[in-house]
Image (cartoon, helix red, strand yellow):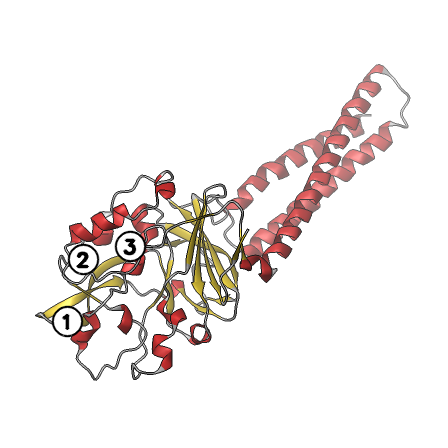
Amino acid sequence: MKKNIILLTLSFCGMCTVIFLSVFLTAVDSPFWLTIAAAVSLIFKILFFVIAVYTLISVSKIKSSRGVIVFKFINWVYVILLSFMFVFMIYIGINMLADNYKYFNTSELKVIPDTAVKAKINPLIDYNGLSKDFILALRSGNIDSNFTKMINYSPKPDVWANMEDKGSWFALDKSVCFNNKTDCRRKAKGLSAMSRIINNPMILIAPVMIATYHLDETLPVCSDEGLRLIPQKLYLDAVNNKIIAVYKGTKALTKCKYLQLSGLNARDIGYEWAKVYKKQNISFPYPDNISKKVYQFKDSITVGSFCEDKNKPGVKCNVLSPVDDKVVFRVTSYPANIELKLWNKKPVSRYTAADIKFEIRFVEELPAEK
């Protein structure tokens, strides 16, 4: 009897220890070591369950007495609880497999969730010569009323401190191709490329081109709709605390090597930390990237040397900065998507629940709305 008491105590204490230590698995930031730790944890749980069953069988052979009956009752309750725990674990495992199947079913990317509400996409404008205060006031007024309920917004000084007041802005028409043998001041004429992001604060994470093609601007690729990276649809899913931005996928976009994720809006609104937790038909070419580790956005508007104002020689353009290999990506085929977790403060690990989620979709045809 003494042996059985020791074994059951060992099983109970061991199981409690394993469950307690499992809580700290969320701090493991390596998929490999997380898998190893989870496998070891499962092996120990099974071992302690087997010990509990062994003691139950062993004590059933002992002549009944008041102490034995009480011990058997405790043993039975413990084994039943462990059984329920394992059934729950199996249930969770099946759900995870089902979710993975659902995620890797590309047809899901062609449908918008029932809980999502269409949000307005504000048009591009010409920022050239406009004051910083006017642009930021316009930006604040463009925040969707539904989204306003989820945030408390005021412009973050670090994002806009280096922006030139009444400065020049790189033009959308020159954001794909530019013949660098011509007058660079032409780059600042027309609708401003950055207005697609600044005018739409809800686009927390935006795909941008970090370099232009040095090609004849009359070539078809230079007017490719996909390479302009203007969102086609925007949805707010308040139920699931998520925003979905849909972009047009074109053949030229899959060949583009100059794509980067910009967190300008996310950083300005307060979601400075991010992690890509799901992706499909997307490649991050550099080994140290946002899909592997939690990343801190440093995006801001600063003065660059890409163009000069026609009326102010020597005055440079306001541009997005910096270029960072960690957020460079490529679209390999369609449909494609990138799903990110965003946090206000640095999370304990990438498995920490997100403050908000953001999804970017690239599709050849716009998704159906349920």
Q: Position of residue 282 (x, y in %)?
A: 49, 66
**249 horizontally vs 40: left or right:** left
Q: Mark 1 to mark 2: distance in Å?
A: 15 Å
Badge 3 element? loop
Measured as percent of width and height from the top left, residue 127 is found at: 20, 60
Q: Secondary structure at mark 2?
A: loop
**Crowding at mark 3 (Cα within 10 Å: few <14, some 14-19, many 20+):** many
**Label 3 sits on what residue type?**
Asn
Picture disc at residue 199:
3
Query: How far across and down, in percent of the image, does residue 264 sit?
Result: 31, 55
- The residue positioned 77% from the left and 37% from the top of the image is 51
Q: Are marks 1 and 2 in contact (CB under 8 Å)?
A: no
Q: Earlier in the sequence, mark 1 or mark 2?
A: 2
Q: Amino acid at mark 2?
A: Met
Q: Is residue 142 left or right of residue 313?
A: right
Instruction: Decide if residue 208 is in sight here.
Output: yes
10 Å crowding of disc 1: few (<14), some (14-19), many (20+): many
The tally of labels here is 3
145, 34: nearer the viewer? 145
Disc 2 marks which residue? 163
**Of callouts 3 and 1, which one flags the residue occurring earlier in the amino acid sequence?**
3
* Residue to which mark 1 is pinned: 308
Relative to 224, residue 235 above or below: above
